[in-house]
């Protein structure tokens, strides 16, 4: 599914964000990418979604080499990779339904498809009773569920969650993690980016640890070793 080979990124001479990072993530895997702040996690994700370009190395996604992706191809790439951030990024003047529908509207989805698909996605994230609510009326966990629903509307093959529980309490964090695990069970590859040790340890899936831009640990059914 994702093959990363010798990926290198530097922001200043001699200052590397990533140094020859290599890994392979199979279709349907659940991988926790962990490390302290500044380890290179966010840079890796930015390159994966073509928000930045690597200085060296390659990323191949399902047979598609996206290392030198053209600008016109980026929207298509981002429909293959759903991304969930820590800060939700919801539109405050739109309801739950409208926030999710908007992600489809900007990509040219028909009103009939939106009307059919959005309720199905809302059902997956268990927000059926909040469909007409605005973000100001939602808890932090509910807001993150809306963000996850929005990331799912294009039927991505991969879901990247970048510190998705950073603004949530323990109970909401556990619920969001369970949702990611359920999403993974239906065949979507999940890449969980976090520094939350307890979260990673509870998953009992593959763990990849970055330190100073290098992979220092990569093991299945592992715990956070730092």
Image (spheres, rainbow, N blue to C red):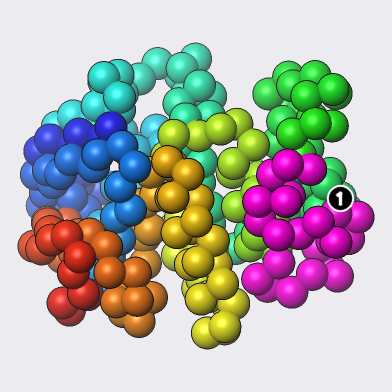
The majority secondary structure of the magenta stretch comes to: helix
Q: Is residue 122 magenta?
A: yes
Location of the C terminus (image quadrant): bottom left
Q: Nearer the viewer, residue 9 or 74?
A: 74
Q: Which residues are magenta?
A: 119-142
> Any magenta on residue 41?
no
Residue 203, placed above or below residue 23: below
170 left or right, relative to 215: right
Q: Which residue is mark 1?
A: 94
Nearer to me, 91 or 38: 91
The foreground one among 107 and 199 is 199
Label 1 CA crowd tier, 10 Å (few <14, some 14–19, many 20+): some
Residue at far right of view: 132
Q: Residue at x 16, y 77 (%)?
A: 225
Q: Position of residue 186 (x, y in %)?
A: 48, 44
Residue 124 seen by the camera = yes
x, y (%) of residue 29? 30, 47
């Amino acid at each position: 599914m994702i093959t990363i080979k010798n990926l290198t990124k530097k922001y200043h001479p001699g200052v590397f964000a990533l140094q020859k990072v290599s890994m392979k993530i199979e279709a349907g895997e659940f991988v926790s990418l962990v490390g302290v702040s500044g380890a290179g996690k966010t840079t890796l994700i930015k390159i994966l979604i073509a928000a930045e370009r690597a200085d060296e190395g390659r990323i191949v996604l399902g047979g598609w080499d996206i290392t030198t992706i053209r600008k016109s191809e980026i929207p298509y790439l981002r429909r293959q990779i759903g991304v969930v951030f820590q800060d939700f990024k919801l539109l405050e003047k739109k309801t739950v339904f409208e926030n999710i529908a908007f992600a489809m509207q900007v990509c040219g989805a028909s009103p009939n498809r939106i009307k059919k698909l959005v309720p199905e996605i809302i059902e997956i994230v268990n927000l059926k009773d909040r469909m007409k609510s605005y973000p100001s009326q939602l808890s932090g966990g509910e807001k993150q569920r809306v963000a996850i629903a929005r990331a799912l509307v294009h039927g991505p093959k991969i879901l990247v969650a970048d510190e998705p529980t950073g603004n949530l309490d323990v109970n909401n964090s556990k619920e969001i993690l369970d949702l990611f695990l359920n999403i993974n069970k239906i065949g979507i590859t999940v890449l969980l980016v976090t520094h939350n040790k307890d979260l990673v340890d509870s998953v009992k899936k593959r763990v990849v640890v970055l330190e100073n831009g290098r992979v220092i640990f990569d093991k299945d059914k592992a715990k956070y070793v730092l």
